[in-house]
Amino acid sequence: MKTNIKNPGLPTFLGLLFLNVCYLFLLPACEKQKNFSYEYDNPGGKMSISAWQFVQQTDSLALLSEAITAAGLQDYYSNAEVHTFIMPTNAAFRTYMSVNKYTSIAAIPVPILRNTLLYHIVKAKVLFSDPALSQNNNPIAYETANGQSMYLSHNANYQGLINEQTNKSWTISVSNLEPVNGVIHIVPELVYFSAKTAGTNIPDPAIVSDTIYATQDTYINGGSLKASNFGSDPLIKLKNVDGSGDYDRKIYLMFDLNQLTKTGTLRNASIEVGVNFTHGLGLKMDLYNVADTSWSEKSMNWNNAPAPDQTPVASLVTGKVATFQWNCTGFIGPRLQQPRKISVMLDGEAKGNETNDLISKENPLSKPPRLVVTFSSGNSMLEMGINNGMTVSKGGIAVLKTAMLEMKGAAPADIIYTLESAPANGWLIMGSSILTTGSKFTQLDLDMSNIVYVHSGSGGAADQLSLSVADPDGGLIEPFDFNISIQ
């Protein structure tokens, strides 16, 4: 679909808008455009009205209009200063309010609403036909009106992307509408800042990894094949159709923890199995402990297979990936005290009817089932670094920076803050979540400007929050105050 509205007046614009984008607003099943393309000699969507007029005249943006008015941000959308406006639809606001348990726009605290909307305003004009964005899947950071960054890019079909290659990203539904004061991109969800994932974590030299491989692996097959053994097959197969029929298969793996050569404080443990084929339907795949480790891949079948525990140790959601990985740190940790053989069973989602053919240790593809374990030295170097506090305008917003708060002695992702007491006259926000007493964030979040303080607009000339800090090696910094000056 091409967005190609060529300098219409208001009546003409409304007619063309109906032809070009109204299906997005009126037909929920058509939320996202397919095969998006642009005319580079005349990027479409030019309009002779302001962004604020566009919002007011578009039914599917009624809740955005209400939110802008409640937050007092009409001037951003109506004045002559050029911005890029990320506009969430009514459905986006309904989802946001449902998740955060707000009954209406009026129920959202104005400072929080204001911060949310300001993140949706980019302080630059960004068209996805601009030469700077010519390369697809190449996110560029732009400053937003709340002081954070938004990464904008597009995919090979020129669909606009928000915060690509970060912890959370979104696809724009309609792009490159040009009011007289900037650009409009329409999104089916409210968006928020998400830290860029690549190259942000400083490696910790005290971290070591160890990998051991399955000593036994096989699968069992129900129905008419209950007595058959598949221990020498190059594939280990998984499928759950009706529980025990001809097409039902379960996988058994065994590892010997005595084969681990590294020691230290356990940081992470995961069981990984290479994928030969998967339907990748987005179904659960569960990993269960099997207490009996006396079975043999050469003789086990459906009839004599030991029963697993009833509760899964770990789960994943299937997808088109090269390796399935289950995080089972909590399962492995206690078993390292007295290393021994462990046995697990894999089973698909009940009646999911999803075929998953995984790679066994007999397979020449060299992706056998393995247990990957990460240790650290156990000697914490955690220490107090910077605690300078911050200054915020009354009713304002400020991003927490490392110049204000920084602990030292471990990799940023391993320095974990706990909010011991929340601010009395404002909110700490990470992503779209309000942090409350007991919430956690890391030094990496601070390094990446992922934490925002929003002042309520009331209270005295100061606010305060209390934090403690820990790392996985046992380091601890007792609770201390972080002071906030309100001006």
Image: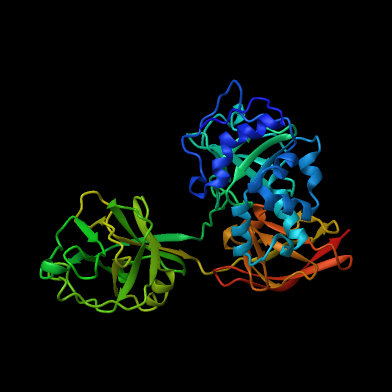
Of the 4 image quadrants, the one containing the C terminus is: bottom right
Q: Tell me the quarter of the picture where residue 341 sits.
A: bottom left
Q: Is residue 127 visible from the viewing direction of this image?
A: no
Please provide percent x and percent y for residue 152. Answer: 60, 40
Tally of numbered discs: 0
The location of residue 326, given as percent across then percent down, is 38, 63
- Pick whichever, 128 or 54, lies toward us: 54
What residue lies at 86% left-to-right and 61% top-to-bottom? 486
- Does the image show residue 10? yes
92 to 439, vertically: above or below: above
User: Left or right of 316: which side holds 77?
Assistant: right
| Left or right side of 123 for 4 | left
**Image x and y of residue 390, in percent:** 80, 59
Q: Quadrant of residue 311?
A: bottom left
- Image: 116 above or below 435: above
**Image height of 401 relative to 104, above or below:** above
Q: How is the image coloured?
A: rainbow
Residue at 38% across / 72% down in the picture? 313
1 left or right of 436?
Answer: left
Q: Residue at x 25, y 61 (%)?
A: 238
**Horizontal side of residue 21 vs 299, given as left or right:** right
Which is nearer the eye, 478 or 281?
Answer: 281
Q: Is residue 134 above or below residue 449?
A: above
Nearest the viewer among 249 and 67 is: 67
Question: Looking at the picture, how far across and down is residue 114, in whole percent?
Answer: 75, 54
